[in-house]
Image: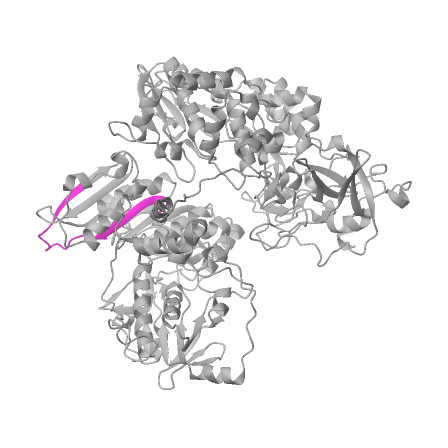
Amino acid sequence: FSRRPSLVPRTTQSPSQLHAEDEKKKVVVIGNGMVGQRFMENLLKLDEKKDCTISTFCEEPRAAYNRVRLTSYFETRDPSALTMTSDFEDDGKTAWYDENNVDILIGDKAQSIDTEKKQVVGESGKVLDYDVAVLATGSYPFVPPIPGKQRPGVFVYRTIEDLEAMLAYVKDNNVQSAAVIGGGLLGLEAAKAVKDMGVKSHIIEFAPILMCRQIDQGGHDALVGKIEEMGLEVHCNARTESFVGEDGSTDMESMSPVSALRFSNEDWDDLPVQMVVVSCGIKPRDELPKEAGIELGPRGGVVVDESLQTSDPNVYAIGEIALYNNFIYGLIAPGYDMANVAAKCVAKELGIYKEEDETGAFTGADLSTKLKLLGCDVASFGVNQPAPDDTDVSSLVWNDPVNGVYRKLIFNKAGTKLRGGILVGDASDYTQLHKMAVINADEEITESPANLLPPPSARGGVVEETEVSSDPSCQICSCNDVTRGQIVDVIQDLGVEEATLPTVKKCSKAGTGCGGCEPDVKAILAQELEKMGGALSNNMCEHFDYSRQELMAKIRLEEDLTSVDSFDKILAKYGHGDGCEICKPAVGSILASLVNDIILRDGRDALQDTNDRSMANMQRGGSYSVVPRVPGGELSPDQLIALGETAKKFNLYTKITGAQRVDLFGAAKYQLPDIWEELGEAGFESGHAYGKALRTVKSCVGSTWCRYGVQDSVSFAVRVENRYKGVRSPHKMKSAVSGCVRECAEAQGKDFGMIATENGYNLYVGGNGGVNPVHAELLASDIDEDTVITYLDRYIMYYILTADKLERTAPWQAKLPGGKNGGGPIEHLKEVIIEDSLGICDELDRRMAHLVETYHDEWAEVVKDPALRAKFKQFANTDENIKKDEMIEFVDMRGQIRPADWPKDGEAQTNWKAPPDDIFSKSEKSWVSVGPVSNFPTNVGTPILYGESQLAVFNNEQRGEWYCTQNMCPHKQAFVLSQGIIGSAADTPKVACPLHKKTFNLEDGQQIGDGDLQILTFPVKIEDGQVMVELPAVPEVDAILGTNGLRVMKSDCVDLAGDALKVPVPVQKKRDVSGLIKKSQKESSTVLRATRNETSTEE
């Protein structure tokens, strides 16, 4: 099941073998999209004796990929994450084609079909003979004849190349706003893509509602509410007249870039946009069969019968080019149905399929669908919009505008059968409803229609795993027509050890289409593993056979907490191996929540993730940001002045955050103690912006200033923030206090929030913003401040003790059981926190009191402690510092500096590779002392300076081993590896880059997992208490790893205001490092002197 390319060479064929190949039946598939690929897979399964050969034309630069999940491309920018087979190779192919003897013609478009000679000719000139040809060319995006469609900045949404072109245009043209023409399925997907580019998105729809084929006005209203909450704007009934150019032109010739949309609607103004994405539907790509004389429909599409055969008996058509019963099917599930039927029919025609086997017939398809569009569940099934003359109809509607949930279920007149429905906002029971309405359409329902109407979220939570149908014939994946029974068969064939979710998905095809059924696949896997004596692993990592919740429970129940007050003790008692970048921060968080000692003392710094170890947020290029705490958003003028003076002194970019604080960007790590010393003198404490802890308690001015305020929200916010500051939790926490129901502080979008009433406060819990916004739920009403604090103590502590690693309060809360009398997780919380139903309130109160009593300002501790301050030294072997702008270019923007844009992956200055072979294999090397052992803390990396080169030394006390590598992560050429967490993977020592978590073998430098990056490594030994590294001479190392030569420079940064000036490259001063680098052995008395060489990159 590996996605890696096969390493088995293809054998050379003998003449007899070649003759045998000529005797085989030839199938040519024209088009290598998802449906064409599925056809080939089906045909190969049927061709057990290998009696046919398959060739396929692939117009795109890479083989088949999942176009349905195209928007997920932004998550990785890796085409292989969308592949339908295995990882893409450099030529665009994958190993699957060679392994299955499929001839794929990458980048070659079929140009003509000669049905008499039975030949297909490609643009390359290649001619392929066929016994059967299968048309799977799909469709074009339909672009209406709107004047201006030819302009730069007008795109369609169809391929990876389309996305890359849009991304480039956005960057090159400073696009701030874009219009998506079309409000159907494809249009909303395109709008999501535009939003993911960081561009304001306008959805332009001609019809009165979005998705008019799937939902009605009520569904539209709910969907629009969700979409507009995400910052997108919807314009329905829009009559787009033209795409206006920057020069004001509205014709079909001008190539002036698009600058606005003009409408013919009365009183509609032009809509300023800098990009347009057209996604108005599809048009079959039928020009090839048309020229070949194959019958088309009146409005396009190749006419096919139930076997998917065209008017030419040797040519079949499947997917979006096929016109069956005068209908084009644009969804993937019907396309897969066609591929299945066509494969059987073709196999039978070629004589490779038994006569007695049923081929089946394509008689249309179920157009039911369940999708997540812009983060919102949208589903329709069965008869969801009955015809006006359909009299056997009665419908029930659930409309919850507060939570954005709309449901319409359509029954027969008697209410005994479910005929169809529309679900928006909560479609978690789609599978059960779809089965009633479509799969078992002839059966009467056993429940009252009124009981089916409420969404699961209103009945006490999401659908539980046990509610997934146990019927083996129940369809789980509609995209690939996979039943529960087929998934169970795959799990049983794999066995307990091999049945992981990714493997089950790959082997069964379930969950590999739109992805909407993945929760059901996971639920079935968990159930079947339990039957087989196994379990779906929720272990933190390979070093702990427990989840975070389970490990927390074991530690908190220890009678002697000193027996588990360090990572080493916990690992020895409950784990194995060395630990890693996953379990170390999780255990560090547990210790901070239970013990609450200073995180940088006694080896705990080795447990801290990227930001916690430096107690600052690492930014692009390896610099850091500083965020002082501003309780309730309240600042004195003197503190504002102090912030300005500090920012000016250290040349820091200054910005107000979204949570009423000031963020100072661009500090070097060695500057942090000095910056915090000055801020501390002005009364500032650590804001914990770097930690999984309470960030802020936002507030409006409340009754102290506002004429609407009914409580002093600022004072209460200050009290709440000062109580919970420094409290570590599984994930970050945010809070807010609003002084009245106008809700200016947005308390209902926070992990916990308070809204003032005339009688006190309403307390809301479990909300969050971000990618998946969640509305908080009301825990208690009209309670005083002391009661709010009591309930919050318990809520936060209950969350800390029972949540998973890196789990926000919203998903944690959603997974809690319902109340004893129903009502969902919020009722359970009321029972636990207010009624003490579990009898743990005393423990929750006691543990929170301990955290409050042991609070310490982490930065104040560092500033006053020379030993802690020393941890921020840039290099262990010298007091010299390399400035931030010597490692990455900074540009001036509106009077402040920021780092240059990182190049895209694959461009220059990314994915750095050392020269081939062992670059230093012929160099004369010597053992160089880089400092005493005491300079290198245990189980972490420490940077050293060798000439102009930055290296990282790792003291892995757990294994009794030392390593030395380059300090630069090759991914983005940032000098940060020494700040990464060290651990092991399958007993291989590794370090995880703190920027993007790419991991490297500390012994040979190879990247672990997917990827071919590598870092240079150097031998280390300890001699007479000194750390010795075997290194070539300074000039040789500097020629490869010198900081100046690896400085990230990019002069085409996007300048939004157009007033940026490039910061001059700092004057290269000569650095004398004499005495720091000494040769041992033969040259022990020789001192090497290295100076910075401005031409080091050219040596």
**Residue 661 picture location, percent across and down:** 51, 27
Closer to the camera in the image, 674 or 850 = 850
Q: Residue at x 51, y 51 (%)?
A: 173
Quarter of the picture containing the C terminus is bottom right
Closer to the camera in the image, 749 or 248 = 749
* Number of disc labels: 0
In the image, is residue 1079 part of the stretch drawn in magenta?
Answer: no
Residue positioned most to the right: 1085
Q: How was the colour assigned to the protein in this rendering? A: one colour
Left or right of 771 on screen, residue 726: right
**Residue 114 picture location, percent across and down:** 38, 83
Residue 599 higher or lower than 1072, as above or below: above
Q: Residue at x 51, y 28 (%)?
A: 590
Residue 711 higher or lower than 279, as above or below: above
Closer to the camera in the image, 535 or 200 = 535
Is any part of residue 616 visible from this angle?
A: no
**Residue 558 picture location, percent across and down:** 50, 23
The magenta region covers: 373-397
Question: Residue 603: which quarter of the image?
Answer: top right
In the image, is residue 392 part of the stretch drawn in magenta?
Answer: yes
**Residue 152 picture location, percent across and down:** 47, 58
Question: Residue 534: which quarter of the image?
Answer: top left
